[in-house]
Image (cartoon, rainbow, N blue to C red):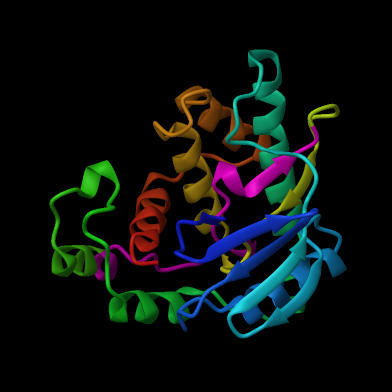
Amino acid sequence: MTVGLSGAAVHRRDGVYRKESADPRHDLVGEGERLTWLRAHGIPAAEVLDCRPGLLVTREVPGRSAAEEWPASARDRIVDGLADVLRALHSLPVADCPFDRRLAVTVPAALAAAVDLDDLDDERTGRTRDELAAELTATRPDREDLAVCHGDPCVPNVLFDPATLRPTGLIDAGRLGVADRWLDLAIATRSLVSDLNPQYGPVAADRFLARYGIAPDPAKTAFYRLLDEFF
């Protein structure tokens, strides 16, 4: 058994994963619906075998996480694959996606949520919840560049075929929905420069954005990383 960052217990046996949680904040039915929607729209994701309140059973996605140690010769292709799979996801028609993660939804939810002040990003360590909430309100973007977003595309949540180095699936899709594409880009680049993933770094984050085809946006990057502190 393992326990993910969400607090849900995850069991793996015979190629099947069981995610269980009694916490009502863990919408496993919603995650199952999102995984099914992804697969129906051509994005590789885990196949849902069973889905009910408190339980999500999926078939194992083949491949290795981008967060695992990859040979130096493979890392550029892993970064490119991460950019490619997100660009493919973001290219899906927004009107076809029934899941809403726009700021009109996420900001009120964030302001009503508790914040784990012991697990803040380094640049916000020591801040109070009220300070974070005030900054979130003050820096909220005026416009959203809407796309279908994964919601948490950190490198552990994207799997790759070790032979072809192509993406084999997205996992942990409980936050999938229509949002500003920078929701995903901010989280992906933060993951690439994190001390938890030293095989990548700032050069990899720059490569990721160049491959995706977008210029850096420091303001939106900062805002969406701050927003993530509340979830």
At horizontal 30% and vertical 47% (from top left) the residue drawn is 121
Give the percent coordinates (x, y) of residue 227: 37, 63
Q: 215 or 170, which is in the foreground?
A: 170
Q: 64 or 20, which is in the foreground?
A: 20
At horizontal 86% and vertical 69% (from top left) the residue drawn is 40
Give the percent coordinates (x, y) of residue 135: 22, 63
In this rendering, would 22 be left or right of 70? Answer: left
Q: Quadrant of the C terminus?
A: bottom left
At horizontal 68% and vertical 50% (from top left) the residue drawn is 86
- In the displayed structure, 123 sits above or below 139; it is above
In this rendering, would 39 be left or right of 6? Answer: right
In the figure, residue 151 lies in which quadrant? bottom right
Queried whether the magenta region covers residue 127, the answer comes back as: no
For the image, the number of numbered tags is: 0
Give the percent coordinates (x, y) of residue 2: 54, 54
- In the displayed structure, 211 sits above or below 114; it is above
Queried whether the magenta region covers residue 151, the answer comes back as: yes
- The magenta region covers 136-161
Q: Quadrant of the N terminus?
A: bottom right
Give the percent coordinates (x, y) of residue 184: 55, 54
- In the displayed structure, 166 sits above or below 185; it is above
In this rendering, would 49 be left or right of 157? Answer: right
